[in-house]
Image: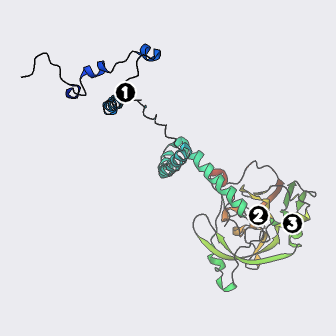
């Protein structure tokens, strides 16, 4: 048996015993004085201390830096493209309802007259822009003529207003250098032109007739008319009245007509003088002429035009 008071040897002490640390403790002052040598620390004992310190250091958790999520940037939308697409869709939808709106407007009495006048006004404007003095109406052969006896007779008020041929004159006024009364013989003294052209009535029928007379342009030149004026107006023995734009009046096929089928005009067809205008509808071709005026202002357009018919009505 070992004595109870016998101390174990140094080799029996464990490396982790606190007593080891105490036995190895050296007074720093004694070391400095040279009386005590610094203790030599067992390398095997020191290394666990270093490893322990490193383990502790590794267990130290650095504070976690919380990075806020990135702020979502607002999406930039090309509003110009959206507006363009919206406009295209809007136009398409509008076009779909235009016919319905137009029909609805025509159903309202207060709008009917205004819409019709504006529509006719636009039609006349477009026709005038397309009209060309060099563009001739179609002419036909003699074999294609409608027989004279089958040529329809249209009257305004009476078939024969009772013109006295011996006293008849055409009174010229307005923007002309030589106003006055002109006899039929003076008009017939101008070069005569004949052509076979189609006469188209607004009532729906048409015939091919043969007409002869002086070019209206030659007559206007004879009286010294200002051809820069806009219009020419005529009045008739039966109180009918009509107007022509100057471009139509100067057209080479527009005639002061005094013949049909190579014979003098008959009373029922407008003797002694009428207009023949192959480029226009029938109601523009006034009969029984008595007055002619060159002007820039129309007080009245025409008998039928003032009742809502087209004022230009080119064929």
Could you say which is closer to the camera, residue 303 or residue 277?
277
Q: For residue 126, which numbered disc appears in the image?
A: none
SS label for mark 1: loop
Snapshot quadrant of residue 25? top left
Is residue 188 toward the left or the right of residue 104 in the image? right
Is residue 17 toward the left or the right of residue 154 in the image? left
Q: In this view, does 203 lie above or below 32?
A: below
Residue hosting label 2? 248
Placement of the N terminus among the 4 image quadrants: top left
Q: How packed is label 3: few (under 14 Cα within 10 Å), some, or many (20 or more)? A: some
User: Where residue 125 sits: x, y (%)?
Assistant: 69, 55
The structure residue drawn at horizontal position 46% and vertical position 16%, both measured from the top left corner, is 32
**Residue furthest left in the image:** 1
Q: Is residue 3 above or below residue 110?
A: above
Q: For residue 219, which numbered disc appears in the image?
A: 3
SS label for mark 3: helix
Q: Is residue 163 visible?
A: no
Is residue 200 toward the left or the right of residue 256 in the image? left
Q: In this view, does 201 lie above or below 15?
A: below
The structure residue drawn at horizontal position 68% and vertical position 61%, both measured from the top left corner, is 127
**Residue furthest right in the image:** 177
| Sooner in the amino-acid sequence: mark 2 or mark 1 | 1
Snapshot quadrant of residue 19? top left
Q: How packed is label 2: few (under 14 Cα within 10 Å), some, or many (20 or more)? A: many
Residue hosting label 1? 40
User: Where residue 29 sits: x, y (%)?
Assistant: 44, 13
Give the distance between the C-alpha atoms of the residues marked 3 and 2, in whole angstroms. 14 Å
Could you say which is closer to the camera, residue 91 or residue 130?
91
Q: How packed is label 1: few (under 14 Cα within 10 Å), some, or many (20 or more)? A: few
Is residue 200 toward the left or the right of residue 128 in the image? left
SS label for mark 2: helix
Give the distance between the C-alpha atoms of the residues marked 1 and 3, in whole angstroms. 147 Å
């Amino acid at each position: 048996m070992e004595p109870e008071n016998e101390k174990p040897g140094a080799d029996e002490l464990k490396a982790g015993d606190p007593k080891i640390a105490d036995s190895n403790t050296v007074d720093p002052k004694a070391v400095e004085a040279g009386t005590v040598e610094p203790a030599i620390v067992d390398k095997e004992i020191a290394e666990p201390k270093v490893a322990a310190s490193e383990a502790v250091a590794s267990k130290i958790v650095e504070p976690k830096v919380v990075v806020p999520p990135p702020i979502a940037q607002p999406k930039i939308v090309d509003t110009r493209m959206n507006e363009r697409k919206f406009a295209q869709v809007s136009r398409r939808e509008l076009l779909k309802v235009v016919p319905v709106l137009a029909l609805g407007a025509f159903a309202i009495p207060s709008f009917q007259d205004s819409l019709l006048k504006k529509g006719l006004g636009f039609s006349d404007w477009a026709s005038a822009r397309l009209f060309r003095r060099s563009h001739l109406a179609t002419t036909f052969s003699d074999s294609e003529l409608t027989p004279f006896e089958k040529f329809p007779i249209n009257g305004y008020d009476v078939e024969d207003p009772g013109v006295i041929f011996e006293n008849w004159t055409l009174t010229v006024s307005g923007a002309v250098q030589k106003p006055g009364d002109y006899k039929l013989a003076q008009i017939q003294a101008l070069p005569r032109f004949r052509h076979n052209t189609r006469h188209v009535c607004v009532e729906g029928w048409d015939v091919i007739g043969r007409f002869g007379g002086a070019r209206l342009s030659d007559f206007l030149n004879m009286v010294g008319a200002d051809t820069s004026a806009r219009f020419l107006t005529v009045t008739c023995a039966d109180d009918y009245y009509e107007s022509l734009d100057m471009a139509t009046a100067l057209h080479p096929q527009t005639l002061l007509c005094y013949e049909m089928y190579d014979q003098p005009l008959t009373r029922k067809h407008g003797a002694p003088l009428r207009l023949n205008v192959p480029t226009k509808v029938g109601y523009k071709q006034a009969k029984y002429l008595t007055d002619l005026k060159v002007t820039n202002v129309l007080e009245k357009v025409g008998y039928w035009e003032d009742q809502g018919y087209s004022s230009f009505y080119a064929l």
